[in-house]
Image (cartoon, rainbow, N blue to C red):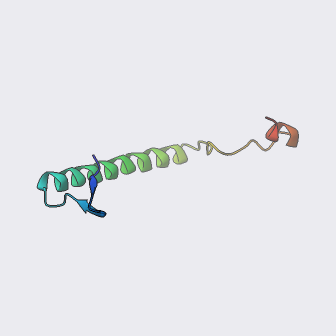
Amino acid sequence: MRQMSTLVKRNRKTDDNNSIGWDAMIRDAKKRIEDLKFSIELFEKKKAAGDRWPGAQLTNHAEAQQHSV
């Protein structure tokens, strides 16, 4: 959950006095950190296993095959 802000009399006001809002932001940041750590572990395992990078093109394709739509 991202912290929300509201427009009050042409000024942007954030509800930062609310401890629940801070708790939600902390939980959100920790969840993002966990997700990134998981991704890094997965990427390292795939690299160690010798998996090809998904965006890499095969070198034995002809030029016409690589760029055909």
10 or 13, nearer to the observer: 10
Residue 65 picture quarter: top right
The number of callouts visible is 0
Left or right of 67 on screen, residue 35 = left
Left or right of 53 on screen, residue 7 = left
33 or 2, nearer to the observer: 2
- Say which residue appears at 43% left-offset and 50% top-offset: 40
| Vertical side of 61 occupied by 21: above or below | below
- Return the x and y of residue 25 as percentages of the image width and height: 24, 54
- Say which residue appears at 38% left-offset and 46% top-offset: 38
Toward the front, the furthest residue is 9
- Return the x and y of residue 49 as percentages of the image width and height: 54, 42
- Return the x and y of residue 50 as percentages of the image width and height: 59, 44
- Say which residue appears at 79% left-offset and 44% top-offset: 59
- Say which residue appears at 19% left-offset and 57% top-offset: 15
8 or 25, nearer to the observer: 8
- Return the x and y of residue 53 as percentages of the image width and height: 61, 45
Left or right of 35 on screen, residue 46 = right
Q: Quadrant of the C terminus?
A: top right
Toward the bottom, the furthest residue is 11
